Image: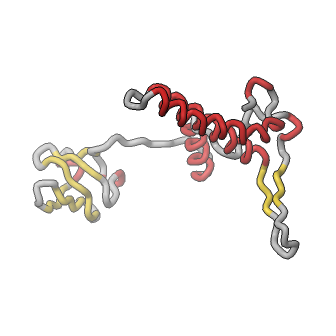
Amino acid sequence: MNLESLHIGMRVKHPQYGLGTVKGLTEHTAVVDFDDGTRREVAPEASGLAPAEAQAAVSGLNLPLASLLREAAEATIKALGVELPQTVVPQIGQRWRGGKLVLHPADPTLQTKEVELEVFFHKIVMVRNNLRVLEQKLNAHESLSAAEKFDWQQYITRSYGSLTTFNVLFKEKEDQF
C-alpha cells in the first residue's frame, strides 16, 4: 500500500501487528495506533500495510461531488421504496394534483396556512392505512373477547366515517373510505 492512499483516521491491517488506525503521516511513514494499544511508525509499502475496510475509487468521472452524492441517494431511496411526502399519491384525483389546501383563521389579522394537497392527501391515506392495520391486529388479538373486539371495532368504524369527508379527493371510488 502506498503512502498517498492513506489518510488520518483510516483503519488499516498490518500482517504482524493486526488492526489499527492511522494517526499521523510523515514523508515516508505512517503513525498507527494498533488495537493492542501500541503505537508504531511503519513504512506502508515495505511492511505490507493494507486497508482494513473495503475501498472504492472513482476515476474518470467528470461530475461534481454534490451531483454524484445526490444521484446515489436518489437511487438508494428508489431501491428501498421509500415514499417521500411530496411525491404524487396515485390515488388522488387528477383535478387535485398541484392544488393547495388553504386554512383561513377566523381572525383576519392572522396568517393563512397553505398545504399542498398531495401532502395532505398522503397523510389522509396514511391514517386510512394505519386504521386498517389496527383493525387487523384487533381482529387477530387472542386475549380480547368477541365483545371487546366489537367495542373497539366501533371506534375504528366511526373514525372511517369521519374520514368520508375526504372521499372527494380520491380518483377511484374503491379507494374511498
- The residue depicted at 35 percent of the width and 54 percent of the height is 4
- The residue depicted at 60 percent of the width and 39 percent of the height is 155
Relative horizontal placement of residue 174, taking residue 68 as reference (left or right): right
Whole-percent x, y for residue 22 in the image: 26, 58
Q: Is residue 42 above or below residue 143?
A: below
Q: Residue furthest front?
A: 147
Q: Which of 101 and 137 lies nearest the eye of the viewer?
A: 137
- Give residue 141's quadrant in the image: top left
Q: Is residue 62 above or below residue 140?
A: below
- The residue depicted at 73 percent of the width and 47 percent of the height is 120
Whole-percent x, y for residue 50 in the image: 25, 44
Whole-percent x, y for residue 95 in the image: 89, 37
- Number of callouts: 0
- The residue depicted at 14 percent of the width and 60 percent of the height is 40
Q: Which of 45 and 110 lies nearest the eye of the viewer?
A: 110
- Give residue 25's quadrant in the image: bottom left
Q: Which of 141 and 69 lies nearest the eye of the viewer?
A: 141
Q: Is residue 120 above or below residue 29?
A: above
Whole-percent x, y for residue 105 in the image: 82, 66
Q: Which of 102 and 32 lies nearest the eye of the viewer?
A: 102
Residue 17 appears in the figure: yes
